[in-house]
């Protein structure tokens, strides 16, 4: 399965609680924190909901 590297580039301050909880579920706490996750449909849906706060890269 593919992996993607997600990086939180914008602060979740002044964002709806639902977006904050989505970031927490993805494992991103602080700005500029990164994580490699499997590209499952569930994770891709969560990334899509908060993509304005993230930078997403494919990992080979």
Image (cartoon, rainbow, N blue to C red):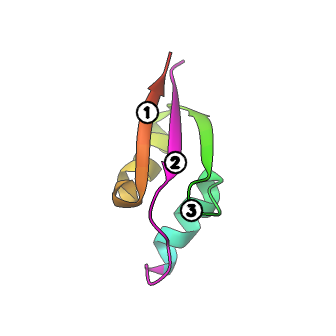
Q: Which part of the image, by quadrant, shows the N terminus?
A: top right
Residue closer to the observer: 29 or 21: 29
The local secondary structure at tag 3 comes to loop
Q: Please give the residue where the numbered disc 2 appears in the rendered image.
A: 7
Q: Earlier in the sequence, mark 1 or mark 3?
A: 3
Residue closer to the observer: 32 or 6: 32
Q: Please give the residue where the numbered disc 1 appears in the rendered image.
A: 57
Q: Give the percent coordinates (x, y) of residue 3.
A: 54, 26
Q: Which residues are magenta?
A: 1-16
Marks 2 and 3: CB-CB under 8 Å? no
Marks 2 and 1: CB-CB under 8 Å? yes
Residue at 42% in and 40% down? 56
Q: Earlier in the sequence, mark 2 or mark 1?
A: 2
Q: Reply above or below: 55 against 40.
A: below
Residue at 33% in and 59% down? 52
The local secondary structure at tag 2 comes to strand
Q: Give the percent coordinates (x, y) of residue 57.
A: 43, 33
Residue 23 marker: none
Q: Which residue is outermost to the front? A: 32
Q: Please give the residue where the numbered disc 3 appears in the rendered image.
A: 31
């Amino acid at each position: 399965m593919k992996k993607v590297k997600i990086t939180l580039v914008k602060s979740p301050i002044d964002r709806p609680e639902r977006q904050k909880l989505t970031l927490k579920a993805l494992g991103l706490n602080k700005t500029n924190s990164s994580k490699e996750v499997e590209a499952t449909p569930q994770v891709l849906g969560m990334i899509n909901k908060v993509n304005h706060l993230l930078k997403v890269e494919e990992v080979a």
